[in-house]
Amino acid sequence: MINLEGVGGGGLVPSAYLVNPPKDDQKIGTPAIAQWCVLGTDTNMYSTGIGFSFFDRFELGYARIILDYHRIRSDIQKLTGNAVDPGKDFIYLDVFHLKTLILNENDYIPAFAVTAEFKFNETIDDINDNIGNVLDIAGYDDNYGTDFDFTFSKTITNLIKCPVLVHANLRLTRGAQHGLFGFSDDYTANIEIYGGVCIMPNLIIGGEYRQKPDEYSSLASVLPGFTLEEDDAWDIHIGYLPTEDFSIAIAYLSFGNAANKERNYGVINLKYDF
């Protein structure tokens, strides 16, 4: 699977495994593409990602994330009596990543990889300008930043009758809500965990937990009653591979508070390996 940010792994959590490693004597593996639709009652997210691996050691990829938040925009306008208008209905986040596999998995040790994710938010500067640079008060610093992932992955075959897949990641980030709300000036360390059970060769069920940094302070002094508090996220999901090259996954995602409201989503993911 390619996650929401374009990195090989679960939906929220990266893995140490490479996307489609090169076969036989090839140097470059075949690419994979993924489409995410994250659908809520008043906000939606969409992500299109592509990734490929080379030299049995590296993974390179890109994802474009679109947040449709026009209802949040309407909430801010109503809350301020139309005095404040973000001026945009969509936020666009571009994510480029390079994963380096440091250790291969064997019977005793997990795979270990380090990933750098460079994120550029095309929209947040304009939004901040349109609302009178209010985000500066909360801690906004940049429209770009780099996350660093330190990831362990292990497939456990002797725990139960079915293989168990585990990813554990430590993320260093300055991003607020994955970078969709921009970036602060301080890095924080955050824990992410994925667990899945392959109940059939082509069917997996699992869940994820992703700690969030909660980078921004309150905006109550400027927008009374409006909070940018950032809660941790978790999901439960089912993945199915009808063919060797195509997979589909559905999930329930609890995203936590984002822009003044608890947000929960139904998620659909489609992935194709060339």
Image (cartoon, grey):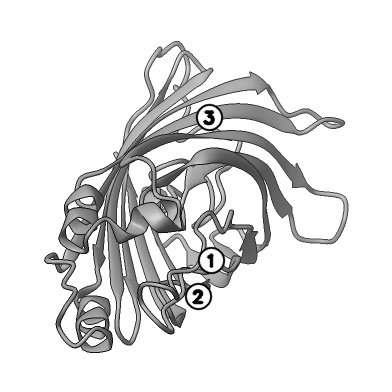
Residue 159, located in which quarter of the rendered image?
bottom right
Horizontal arrangement in the rendering, residue 36 relative to residue 253 (left or right): left
Q: Depth-wise, is mark 3 or mark 1 nearer the camera?
A: 1
The residue positioned 43% from the left and 84% from the top of the image is 225
Do the numbered discs 3 and 1 sit on residues whose CB atoms are within 8 Å? Answer: no
Disc 3/disc 1 C-alpha distance (Å): 23 Å
Q: What number is the disc on residue 115?
A: 3
Mark 1 neighbour density, 10 Å: few (under 14) some (14–19) many (20 or more): many
Q: Is mark 1 on a helix, strand or loop?
A: loop
Give the x, y percent position of residue 99.
50, 27
Horizontal arrangement in the rendering, residue 217 relative to residue 208 (left or right): left
Q: Does residue 246 appear in this view?
A: no
- The amino acid sitting under disc 1 is Glu
Q: Which residue bears the numbered disc 2?
A: 257
The residue positioned 53% from the left and 70% from the top of the image is 238
Give the x, y percent position of residue 184.
46, 44
Residue 236, located in which quarter of the rendered image?
bottom right
Do the numbered discs 1 and 2 sit on residues whose CB atoms are within 8 Å? Answer: yes
The residue positioned 32% from the left and 33% from the top of the image is 31
Q: Which residue bears the numbered disc 1?
A: 230
Disc 3/disc 2 C-alpha distance (Å): 27 Å
Compare marks 3 and 2 and give the one earlier in the sequence. Answer: 3
Disc 1/disc 2 C-alpha distance (Å): 6 Å
The residue positioned 80% from the left and 49% from the top of the image is 157
- The amino acid sitting under disc 2 is Asn
Q: What element carries label 2?
A: strand
Mark 2 neighbour density, 10 Å: few (under 14) some (14–19) many (20 or more): some
- The amino acid sitting under disc 3 is Thr
